[in-house]
Image: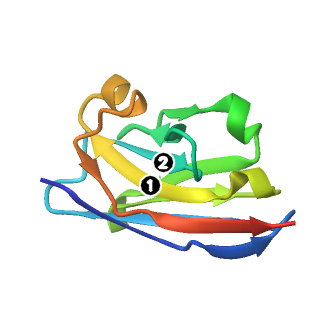
Amino acid sequence: QVQLVESGGGLVQAGGSVTLSCAASGRTFTRYTMSWFRQAPGKEREFVAAITWSGGITLNVDSVKGRFLIYRDGAKNTVYLQMNSLQPEDTAVYYCASGDDRGAVIAGRAESWGQGTQVTVSS
């Protein structure tokens, strides 16, 4: 069982940047796909980005439009989501998720989920 703890959320003005962190613990942090999802009020949870153990990256191009960057620090068992040029529509609770199966993780069927961190973008 993997435990995931997100941090870094908060209030930011439109056009600003925020970097979220997700620290993993509980088992060997290898051969896992780590990902970020978000859920805005009244909307379904949405896939944002994923990174595999080998560094392969998948982005939800439609929603992040080149503004977001996902990367990981294997030594720290941590994955990051750098969000630039934030807009009010990016306001959501951001969740970290992980699992062995990349396809399952991206589809929302991850084995482990964090508790979420709120990001609020003011206009």
Res 121 quadrant in image: bottom right
The CA span between labels 1 and 2 is 6 Å
Which residue lies at the image location 53% right of the left edge and 38% below the top edge? 46
Q: Using the image as rendered, state which of residue 123 and residue 16 is in the foreground.
A: 123
Three-letter residue code for mark 1 = Tyr
Q: Earlier in the sequence, mark 1 or mark 2?
A: 2
Three-letter residue code for mark 2 = Trp
Which residue lies at the image location 51% right of the left edge and 57% below the top edge? 94
Find disc 1 in the rendering and name its residue: 95
Res 48 quadrant in image: top right
Badge 2: few (under 14), some or many (20 or more) residues near its Cα, within 10 Å? many
Residue 9, position as x, y percentages in the image: 57, 72
Which residue lies at the image location 48% right of the left edge and 67% below the top edge? 117
Residue 34, position as x, y percentages in the image: 38, 45
- Does 39 sit left or right of 1 as displayed? right
Residue 36, position as x, y percentages in the image: 48, 48
Find disc 2 in the rendering and name its residue: 36
Q: Quadrant of the C terminus?
A: bottom right
